[in-house]
Image (cartoon, helix red, strand yellow):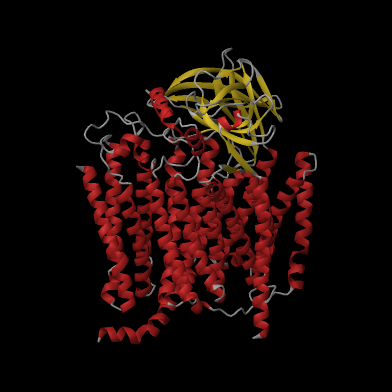
Amino acid sequence: MKLHRKRKLAVILFVATGLSATVGLTLFALGQNMNMFYTPSQVAMGEVEVGRRFRIGGMVKEGSFVSDSDSLKVRFETTDYAHAVPVEYEGILPDLFREGQGIVAEGSVDSQGVFSASKVLAKHDENYMSQEVKAALDASGASTANNSIQNNSER
Amino acid sequence: MIPELGQFSLILAFSLSILLGTVPIIGAETNNFLWMSLARPLSAGVFVFLAIALVLLAYSFVTDDFSVQIVAAQSNSLLPMRYKLTALWGGHEGSFLLWTFMLAGWMLAVSMYSKSMPTQFVARVLGVLGILCVCYILFMLATSNPFERITPLPPADGSDLNTALQDFGFIVHPPTLYMGYVGFSVVFAFAIAALLSGRLDSAWARWSRPWANAAWAILTIGIALGSWWAYYELGWGGWWAWDPVENPPLITWLLGTALIHSLAVTEKRGVFKSWTVLLAILAFAGSLLGTFITRSGLLTSVHAFASDPTRGVFILGILLLTVGGALLLYALRAPLMKSELGFTLVSREIFLLTNNVLLVVSAASIFLGTLFPMVYQALTDDLISIGPPYFNAVFVPLMIILMLFLGVGPMSRWKKTSTEYLVKQVSRVVVVSLMIGVVLPLIILLEFSLAATVCVALASWIVLTIGKDLTNKIANKASVWSGLYALPLSYVGMMLAHTGIAVMLIGAGLTSYFSLERSVLLGPGEKVEIGSYAYIFNGHEEIRGPNYVGNRANISVLKNGNEIETLFPERRIYLATGTPSTEMAIDAGFLRDLFVTLGEQKEGGAWSMTVYVKPFIRWIWLGAIFMALGGIIAAADKRYRLLRRREQENYEKKKAPSDLQVAS
């Protein structure tokens, strides 16, 4: 019986060491790779430090989209209808990117308050608004106004 | 009229599943043979009425009955017939009906292929599956009725199937994924039936092994199809994004992989009994978690359905009820599951335990990363996202360790393996794999790369240890062929699946490190160079399809100055919604994929586009095919059926006295 117990203990210790090591590493990795999310108002008011990676979500402001004619650079403003933040991106935008649609962009903001995006996401379901964008609009109290805008743009 | 008949059929299936979820289980508890024997006909009944409901819903889609809400929301009169039919699962309600139908399909399969199992056990298994059916159909009837009508004024035309879904991948990926997902309910039901009966010997493990293997194989294919589809349809050239909705299938798959290995130990050696039961419950919980995440709208993802919070609460209720109930039963029966640990620290049992620990830990870390944003938001009210770097940092090292063990595990023996024996077996293999790992990438790349060396060395390690094990197995046979012929199917399945891991590793590793990608703006006649390839834009033409218009570009691909392929990427505008969609053009190859996605035309007439070279990407899905084949072959092993018959005779013998009592 004693030997049997010893073995059982060894197995349990083995599993516990493995588990705790991974949990430690996992939590460390989580802390390193967390992207905070901010609304255009928060960014416009300078709540985010310059150069830090984060996500911004809002609607693409009507009439703000400018596409460079001889490179892949694009520039638009993302807004929660309280404040707008200029966004620069170089690359091909997702299919569903349109003015008046919700987007989420990942990148960082410079000292002039311009957000340079390394990734722009637009959702695949037009009826579906991402949680981030919805939160941004709710925070600025514009979500109902936005719905009517979205509906108008579809008719 | 037709949709109402469908609804009626759904209600009939509901009533029958209530009977199925109660009568046979009570019968099994009270030894009432008649009640137990109702399990099979009731399962068939539930299946038939769910099938009728599904066919009638499909009929509404095919005949453009836009008075049915989901037809109006997901279909359009211009939609090609194949998409009209499959638009059924393009939204929440219809896809849940498909999900439930899959469960009924598995139920029917269990009732047909369980002739050799004891009646009492079958009654309990089907009864548990019946309870799941009750939950799912109730969920549909209460919160998401697929037959809901739009009254009083139905729209003249539907608002179309999401353009990203109008593709072959959409026809095959959801049904396969659901079938694999739901398959783990069967193993769950076997485990619960074993817990209910209190007979947690190796018999239940033997009975559930083929089902676990089959569900696992189908889930593998389902996930691989999703990855392949995302790769060519979404147009960002990726095959795995660690998207919150991709993760639950992977979590389920990892737990399922742990389960099929742990079932082997429980069956062969009678140990890890309680752990195996727990894994069966967890794998099932993983599949429900997937449903919950997709349908509750709690997480942001490309897969999320436009959602309604009551559904999330309802699914959470089902999750708590079934998994909570199962865990409670598990706790009550825990004393029955004692097993003697008759093995030493170097034995096949320990290697399989290591496999299980690594797989479960990786599943847990993915679970943590997926749900962490949700928990964080609940605690701090701040929104965060966890990106691929987290998942790669945690998952990749765990998989590397797993693959190191994968080589020695199958070679080791039950109970006790001498370390010297293992060292003698693998020492040459280690040297050869390291040599291949260093030399092969050097020849191909002409430079040293640690990533390529690790990938190639690990893959060679896996393949060579399998080869070594195989030569050991057939060494004593008269000829190679008779040796191969004598191998049990379950062993052949394992070899294939493990080879699949090696193949997938090569694909995933080399694609991740050596893919090339460039976004450019090209006018007609202009050229972009990428690696040893050059892409020339020859111009574009306007095109018109059944439900879209658009542009098609003509692009020649040159390798070292010789033209090897012409690619035609498209940019479409779907007429019903005005949604743009890119159709990438791919030249698929065994050693590399070349592809182009078309962006948009800028003012000067030039087009924005992204060109890619993806080495070995096909190997990812080839590996998955190997794994799934392995699973199917192992599930087909005759041994399970033969042993099952013998097992049943024993079971019946032991049960005989109580059966007699009932008879008298």
Asked which quadrant contains residue A49, the reply is top right
Q: Nearer the viewer, residue B554 or A105?
A: A105
Q: Position of residue B117 (x, y in %)?
A: 39, 73
Of residues B368 and B461, the one drawn nearer to the viewer in this rendering: B368
- Using residue B253 as the reference point, say whether residue B69 is left or right of it: left
Rendering coords of residue A6 (x, y %):
68, 79
- Determine the residue positioned at 77% across, 68% down: B424
| Residue for point 67% across, 63% down | A18
Q: Nearer the viewer, residue A49 or B26?
A: A49
State the quadrant of the N terminus of chain B: top left
- Residue B605 vs B481, above or below: the answer is above
Expressed as whole percent of the image width and height from the top left, the position of residue B44 reads 29, 61
Q: Residue furthest left?
A: B1
The count of marks equals: 0
Q: Which residue of the protein is positioned furthest toward the top in this rendering?
A: B604
Q: Is residue B214 visible?
A: no
Report which quarter residue A115 is drawn in. Answer: top right
Q: Quadrant of the C terminus of chain B?
A: bottom left
Q: Is residue B301 above or below residue B369?
A: above
The vertical placement of B480 against A33, above or below, is: below
B189 and A82: which is toward the camera: A82
Can residue B257 be seen here?
yes
Q: Position of residue B111 (x, y in %)?
A: 35, 65
Q: Give residue B261's quadrant in the image.
A: bottom right
